[in-house]
Image (spheres, grey):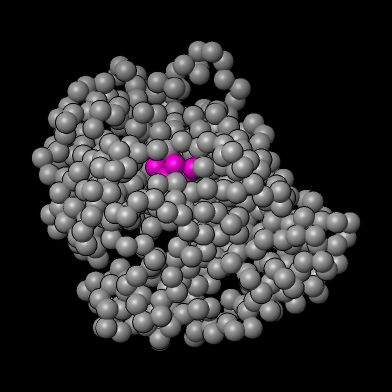
Amino acid sequence: MTPFTYLRADTVNDAVRLGAGETAAFLGGGTNIVDLMRETVARHETLVDVTRLSAAVTETAEGGLLIGAAATNTAVAEHHGVRTRYPMLSRAILAGASAQIRNMATVGGNLLQRTRCTYFYDTDGSHCNKRAPGTGCDAREGFNRIHAILGASDACVATHPSDMCVALTALDAVVHVEGRDGARTLPFGELHRLPGDRPDLDTVLAAGDLITAIELPPLGVAARSTYRKVRDRASYAFALISVAAAIEMDGDRIADVRIAFGGVAHKPWRATKAEPALRGELASEAVFRAAAAAEFADARPLRDNAFKPELATRTLAAVLAELAKGDVA
Amino acid sequence: MSFVVNGNAVPGPADPRVSLLDHLRETLHLTGTKKGCNQGACGACTVLVDGERILSCLALAVQYDGREITTIEGLAETAALHPLQAAFIEHDGFQCGYCTPGQICSAIGMAAEARRGVPSHVSADLAADVILTRDEIQERMSGNLCRCGAHNGIIDAIQATMAPAPTAETSAELAA
């Protein structure tokens, strides 16, 4: 680990002031950044500890929830309002990492963990455009079972590892950001980037921008929602495919639906093609599969992950069938 | 800065790069907490901070100013074993013993989470009280690996100690 200066922020203004500059980074629970710095993938000169800023989960005037960015993953997953009104978010968080990591990791840190793959970590042996721009991507022709099938580029085929973010994308969450020019908000789906020719940039945030909170809008459809994660072992592994889905039925007809996929792209993937293919339709296996087919029509699988479009299709169909029957608590 | 380890005030690290794990082992000479993977994958370094289980290898010690840390050395107040330590012996919950301090600290944190109703990935109902079935323990302990493969004995020991309806005395003992 290269030497750094540790600073603790007691207010949002302090954090934004201390965190300005290209060589500074904000520190949450540290579960990703400490590892990246130890492996010298990251070499920040200043870490600004923001874990003492707001961790509160509060009701908004609109009837949603405002989650302070310093809230731990566990605190969000166990919050009564999240469990009952946004169950897919609890389920997504509980499907991620291990309990020890969920106790440390913050919401802000989860959003800003690096989009990554094993080649990104391999500082000694691998080319990686995300770690060292312009050096090439060894994953594209390498072992790429966990990699992206949608929205990738020649430069990068890594996937975003967060489960929480898949649910937040489906829930139309809003990101509250404080920067040098003051406060602003952005839709969750606009926070993370596709790699293009700048895979070194995971988000649209500028240096010094601090995520202060995530806002969940009131969303009736979310009460009947869940998260399904398919992985190589039963627990504590990244997703091969994951699905966050919410449904509202009108008899046998799908009145409303929200869907996002994990494990398919450089960012959590909102299913903007599958959702309109489902609204107003009679719930059936054929309709679910057709919606998935619309979403994955542009999929470009790699050598080792040609199974992903079909796995994603089957996972979506299974989740929607359960939700349509009302089987999911 | 300073924090409290097993009830004693101790100094913080001289360098912010020092992990809580290295600080415990190298500076405070509390070598019960083990370094397995040093990258958050194995759980051998699990300790309790204000009663919550965390991975000390991914924790920068400097972040834990003012917090109360409990390691395997601090679980039992006297030479006697913590009930869960005794259960690990009774149920063959280890072979080489390297992962055991992390397993035991993790299980104590896990039981506290279950008591306050934190659901898990395998909980059928997110809002129901937690019953520590074998499946629940297995999922909740998935962050602690055992290369010897003593997982069945580990789960037996945890279930025998944590899952029976606790009396007032055993609750106090387990929370220690």
Q: Is residue B82 magenta?
A: no
**Count of numbered tags:** 0
Quadrant of the image occupied by residue B126: top right
Can the viewer see residue A171?
yes
Quadrant of the image occupied by residue B130: top right
Name the quarter where the N terminus of chain A is drawn: bottom left
Image coordinates for residue B154, horizontal then vertical, percent = 48, 40
Q: Residue at x 36, y 75 (%)?
A: A199
Name the quarter where the C terminus of chain A is drawn: top right
Image coordinates for residue B145, horizontal then vertical, percent = 42, 50
Q: Residue at x 70, y 68 (%)?
A: A275
Relative to residue A194, is residue B121 drawn left or right?
right
Magenta segment range? A67-73
Can the viewer see residue B93?
no
Relative to residue A179, is residue B92 drawn left or right?
right
Looking at the image, which residue sits at the far right?
A: A251
Front residue (pair B148, A293): A293
Front residue (pair A174, A291): A174
Looking at the image, which residue sits at the far left?
A: B14
Image coordinates for residue A20, horizontal then vertical, percent = 23, 55
Looking at the image, which residue sits at the far front?
A: A181
Q: Residue at x 28, y 72 (%)?
A: A131
Front residue (pair B3, A8): A8
Q: Residue at x 40, y 38 (%)?
A: A54
Front residue (pair B166, A8): A8
Image coordinates for residue B153, horizontal then vertical, percent = 50, 40
Instruction: Give the answer, above or below, for where A236 lies relative to B93.
Output: below
Instruction: Give the answer, above or below, for where B132 lies relative to A144.
Output: above
Relative to residue A105, is residue A1 drawn left or right?
left
Instruction: Give the answer, above or below, for where B49 lies relative to A245.
Output: above
